[in-house]
Image: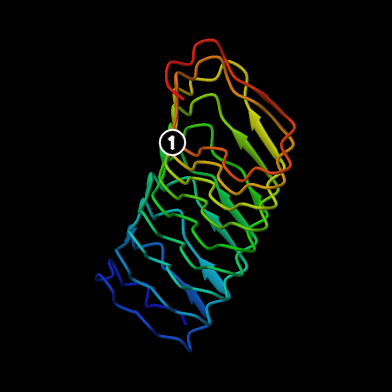
Amino acid sequence: FTFPASLTDFGQGDFIGCSSLTKINIPSSVISIPDECFRDCSSFVEIIIPSSITLIGKSAFKGCSSIIQLTIPSSVVSIGDECFIGCSKLQNLIIHSSIQSIGKCLFKGCSSLSDFIIPSSVVSINDDAFNNCLSLTEINIPSSVTFIGNGAFYMCESLCDIIFEEKSSLISIGNNAFCGCSSISQLMIPSSVTSIGNNAFSGCSYMSQISIPSSLESL
């Protein structure tokens, strides 16, 4: 489906449940994708997002369960919570933008997501951001990140490598943050961390080594 070049904006929820749409090409005249705009468009296999887009709203692509890959252009400065929740076939998502936050439940239930690089601009990974991303095997936490929220990587059962960049700014790891990550064998928590929440590593049954910094004040 191709929109007219004269289009300047979408309305909230404009295409909710348009389950027969398979492809959209958003014109460069549009600058934002509002909340729930394409929610439950379950047949989407291709979405072309132009470099004119600066904002993608909450739940904009929630339930688009046929998308396999997606590229977010560098123009995007904000992606709303739950944006890709339930995109169960999404394998590869590239974010070129300078977003500062991985929103709540952003990739929750993206069970096929295996390749994702967190941008170096990100300062917070919020609650349930990668909850049940069952195919995620490796994640690199940039030194800019200060906060990992509750359940951020809950039940990421294939996650075996968590790499914290040098000179990490990480201060807090939330409740259940890595709960159920049963493939992690070892973990080096940065010396900057002062707080680790309840059950943060509960169910990490394969873990044989963990390094906890002397800076820790709450566990």
Q: Quadrant of residue 89?
A: bottom right
Left or right: 115 with respect to 62? right
Report the front residue among 219 and 55.
219
Name the residue rendered at 46%, 53% in the picture.
51
Q: Which color scheme did the rendering employ for the protein?
A: rainbow
Report the front residue among 115 and 25.
115
Q: Position of residue 79 (x, y in %)?
A: 39, 51
- Most extreme residue toward the left is 11
Name the residue rendered at 32%, 69% in the picture.
36
Q: Quadrant of residue 4?
A: bottom left
The kind of secondary structure element at disc 1 is loop
Q: Kindly identify the amino acid type of the residue bearing the numbered disc 1.
A: Gly
Badge 1: few (under 14), some or many (20 or more) residues near its Cα, within 10 Å?
many
Name the residue rendered at 56%, 40% in the picture.
118
User: Is 68 above or below relative to 138?
Assistant: below
- Most extreme residue toward the bottom is 20
Q: Which residue is mark 1?
A: 174
Q: Position of residue 201 (x, y in %)?
A: 57, 38
Name the residue rendered at 52%, 63% in the picture.
109
Q: Position of residue 63 (x, y in %)?
A: 45, 72
- Most extreme residue toward the top is 214
User: Is 149 above or below relative to 194?
Assistant: below
Q: Position of residue 153 (x, y in %)?
A: 54, 46
Left or right: 97 with respect to 14? right
